[in-house]
Image (cartoon, helix red, strand yellow):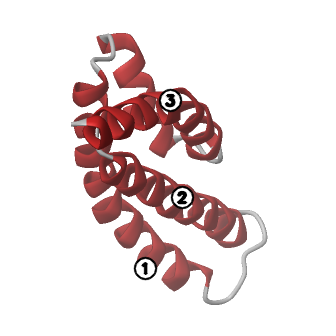
Amino acid sequence: MKRSVLTRYRVMAYVTGVLLVLLTLGTIGKYVLDMDGAADFTKVVGIAHGWLYVVYLVFAFDLGSKAKWPVAKQLWVLLAGTIPTAAFFVERKVSRELEAMVAEDGAAVAKA
């Protein structure tokens, strides 16, 4: 597996995670704290998160199919972008697991 597959997944996991945390904070500000401007903030961040989550899904699915993950693991990684802060923890775990695979493939290419 190429390093770029893992890198683009990691970038989108962080982007999706940050946007989801911002969306959660905006929703709290809108409904709990009744803050001015929170409705507009929530709308903009919600739209951005929605579109970028689709990109995250594509990259995560690509990563999972190249890593030959079982369906249950792939579903967990795909759903991580919908649970605030879960994307950060899942990304870290996946990156640690796949770094060895990326290094192996890099060494195999270097030998050839």
- Which residue is depicted at the point 71% across and 71% down? 29
Q: Quadrant of the N terminus?
A: top left
For mark 1, does the 10 Å Cα neighbourhood hold few (<14), some (14 to 19), or many (20 or more) residues? few
Residue 12: numbered disc: none
User: From the viewer's perspective, is residue 29 above or below residue 12?
Assistant: below
Image depth: mark 2 or mark 1 in front: 2
Looking at the rendered structure, the kind of residue marked 2 is Tyr
Quarter of the figure with residue 74: top left
Relative to 21, is 29 on the left or the right?
right
Q: CA distance from mark 2 to mark 1?
A: 18 Å
Please name the residue that numbered disc 2 is placed on. 14
Residue at 30% across / 13% down in the picture? Answer: 71
**Counting other residues with Cα less than 10 Å from the Cα at mark 3, is it few (<14), some (14-19), or many (20 or more)?**
few
* Amino acid type indicated by mark 3: Ala
Residue type, numbered disc 1: Val
Report the side of 3 relative to 33 (left or right). Answer: left
Residue position marked by numbered label 1 in the rendering: 44
Element type at mark 1: helix
- To which residue does mark 3 refer? 100
**Gap between marks 3 and 1 measured at Cα:** 38 Å
Location of residue 102 with respect to 65 vertically, above or below = below
List x then y, in percent, for residue 46: 43, 67
**Does label 3 or label 1 sit earlier along the sequence?**
1
Q: Nearer the viewer, residue 100 or 5?
A: 100
Asked whether the residues under the numbered discs 3 and 1 touch, taking CB atoms below 8 Å apart as contact, a structural biologist would say no
